[in-house]
Image (spheres, rainbow, N blue to C red):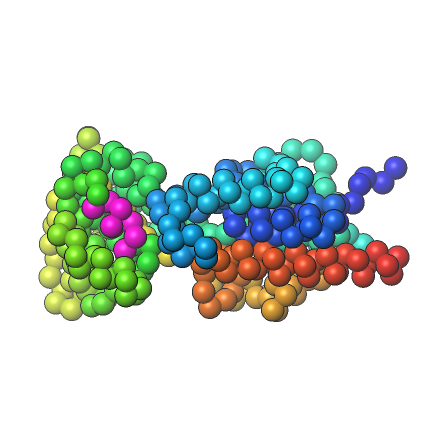
Amino acid sequence: MASHIHDLIIIGGGPGGLTAGIYAQRAALDTLLIEKGAPGGQVNNSDEVENWPGMVKINGAELALNLARHAQSYGLEPMAREVVCVQPGIEFHEVCLDEGPPLRTHAVILATGGSPRKLGIPGEEEYYGKGVSYCAVCDGFFFRNKKVVVVGGGDSAAEEALYLAKITERVQIVHRRDELRAGRILQQRLAREPKIEIVWSSVLTSINANSAGVNGIDVRNLETGVKSKIPVDGVFIFVGFNPNNKLVPAGTKMSVKGYVITDEKCVTSIPGIYAVGDLREKYARQIVTAAADGCVAALAAAHYVEAKKTSL
C-alpha cells in the first residue's frame, strides 16, 4: 500500500514558514510543518522588534509565540524533527528525516533561514560560549557590568549594541568601514548612548583569553595598519548571515553566495519546490519580507497542488 502523500511540507518554523503554514491551512491543504528547534527561528533572539507592522514594539520571543499560536489556531501542529534531505521527483517529492521512512509530498516550501556569519579568526571557535557570542539577548546577562565589543555595522549590530549598553559597563563597536550601514534612527540612538564607542575602519585579527574566558582582542586599523589590543570580557559578532542551504536539492539554481534564486512566486528552478525568507535571493531580508514570502509561496503551492491533482 502506497504511503500517504501530503499536499505540502514546510521545512522551517520561522516567520516565513509559520506564515506559509497559516495560508496553507486557510487554503485547506494537507500541510505538515517540520521544525527541529523552537518555532519562530532567529526572531526568538531579538530583544525588541520595532519594524513589525501594527506593533510599535514587541519582544522577539513574544512575536514568535504569536506567530506559532496563529498557525496552531488553524490546526497546524509542527513536527519537531530534523530533515536531512529533500529528494525531488516527478510524481511527488520526498522529505527524508533523521529517522524513519521518507515523507511524500506534492510541494515543499524551504524556510530554513540563515546562520550567523563567522569572522574566521583565531579564538573565535575556541572561545565560543566562553566569551564569544552571536546573540546578545541570549548571553548579555552574563556580561553585566563588564566590557564588551560588538563586531559589525548593520542594523543587527546597532540593535545588539544598544541592548548591551543597558547591561554592561562599556560597549565598543568595531566596524571595518568609516560609516555604519545601520538605519539612521539606530545611528542616532547610538550617538546618544554614552556607554557606546565606535572603533572605525578596523577589524579583529584574534580573540584572546585566559583560563576564565575571553580577556581581550587584537585589532588592526585598515587605514593606518596600526595594531592594538583592547581588553574586553566578551565579543558579540554580527556580521551578517549565511543561508542554510544544505537541504536545497542538487540542480536548484542558486546565486554565487548560496541564496536560492526564485521567481516572484518564490518558485525555484524545480517545480513544486519553493524557497522563502533568508534562504531566498532578494533585496531585503526582514521579518516582514520573510512573512510575505511565506504567504506568496503557500498561495502558489496551493495553486500548483490543485492543478496537479486536477490533471491526475
Relative horizontal placement of residue 8, taking residue 3 as reference (left or right):
left
Quadrant of residue 250 within the rendered picture: bottom right
In this view of the protein, can residue 87 be seen by the observer? no
Q: Residue furthest top?
A: 211
Locate residue 37, reporting x and y percent: 51, 38
Relative horizontal placement of residue 117, taking residue 27 as reference (left or right):
left
The quarter of the picture where the C terminus appears is: bottom right
Residue at 58% from the left image edge and 43% from the top image edge: 70
Locate residue 300, reporting x and y percent: 68, 61
| Residue in front for this viewpoint, 127 or 234 | 234
Quadrant of residue 132 within the rendered picture: top left
Most frequent secondary structure within the magenta stretch = helix
Q: Which residues are magenta?
A: 158-165
In this view of the protein, can residue 60 be seen by the observer? yes
| Residue in front for this viewpoint, 91 or 120 | 91
Locate residue 76, reporting x and y percent: 65, 41
Q: Is residue 163 magenta?
A: yes
In the displayed structure, 273 sits above or below 126; it is below
The quarter of the picture where the N terminus appears is: top right
| Residue in front for this viewpoint, 285 or 209 | 285
Residue at 81% from the left image edge and 54% from the top image edge: 91
Residue at 45% from the left image edge and 65% from the top image edge: 284
Q: Is residue 86 magenta?
A: no
In the displayed structure, 183 sits above or below 130; it is below
Locate residue 38, reporting x and y percent: 50, 38
Relative horizontal placement of residue 201, taking residue 183 as reference (left or right):
left
